[in-house]
Image (cartoon, grey):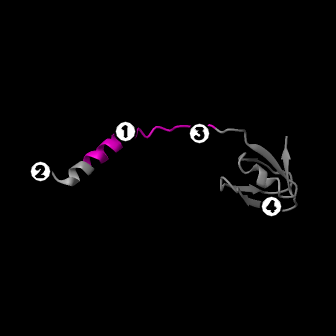
């Protein structure tokens, strides 16, 4: 009679042999948005959805913002969405 562990080992081999490790690009639903900083000093903001950190170094600095974070950025008075 075979050991139960052998079935588990066989499954592990099958799982790992099915994973190619190939990079699959993620397609975004919409384009990212550009925002300009209008404040006087720097500003660091964390995206509400992506959790990405955005750093604006000074007045006139422009950053590309993930489209999922854009609505939250529009609520910050010193950030202006560019069209």
Residue drawn at 83 percent across, 58 percent down: 76
Q: Position of residue 51 (x, y in %)?
A: 65, 56
- Asked if the stretch drawn in magenta spans residue 29, the answer is no
Q: Which mark is residue 56?
A: none
Is 83 situated above or below 58?
Answer: above
Judging by the rendered image, the residue that carries numbered circle 1 is 18
Judging by the rendered image, the residue that carries numbered circle 2 is 1
Q: Nearer the viewer, mark 3 or mark 4?
A: 3
Q: Nearer the viewer, residue 46 or 44?
A: 46
**Magenta segment:** 9-27
Residue 49: quadrant of the picture: bottom right
Mark 4 or 2 closer to N-term?
2
Judging by the rendered image, the residue that carries numbered circle 3 is 26
Residue 67: quadrant of the picture: top right
Mark 3 or 4 closer to N-term?
3
Q: Label 1's element?
A: helix
Q: Nearer the viewer, residue 42 or 20?
A: 20
Give the distance between the C-alpha atoms of the residues marked 3 and 4, in whole angstroms: 31 Å
Residue drawn at 52 percent across, 37 percent down: 24
Q: Label 2's element?
A: loop
Q: Position of residue 6 (x, y in %)?
A: 21, 50
Dividing the image into 4 quarters, which one contains the C terminus? top right
Is 61 situated above or below 26?
Answer: below
Q: Which mark is residue 42?
A: 4
Left or right position of 17 against 72: left
């Amino acid at each position: 009679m075979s050991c139960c562990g052998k079935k588990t080992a066989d499954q592990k081999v099958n799982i790992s042999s099915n994973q190619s490790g190939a990079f699959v690009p993620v397609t975004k639903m919409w384009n990212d948005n550009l925002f300009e900083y209008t404040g006087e000093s720097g500003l660091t903001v964390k995206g509400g959805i992506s959790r990405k950190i955005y750093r604006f170094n000074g007045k006139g600095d422009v950053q590309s913002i993930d489209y999922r974070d854009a609505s939250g950025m529009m609520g910050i008075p010193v950030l202006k969405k560019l069209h």
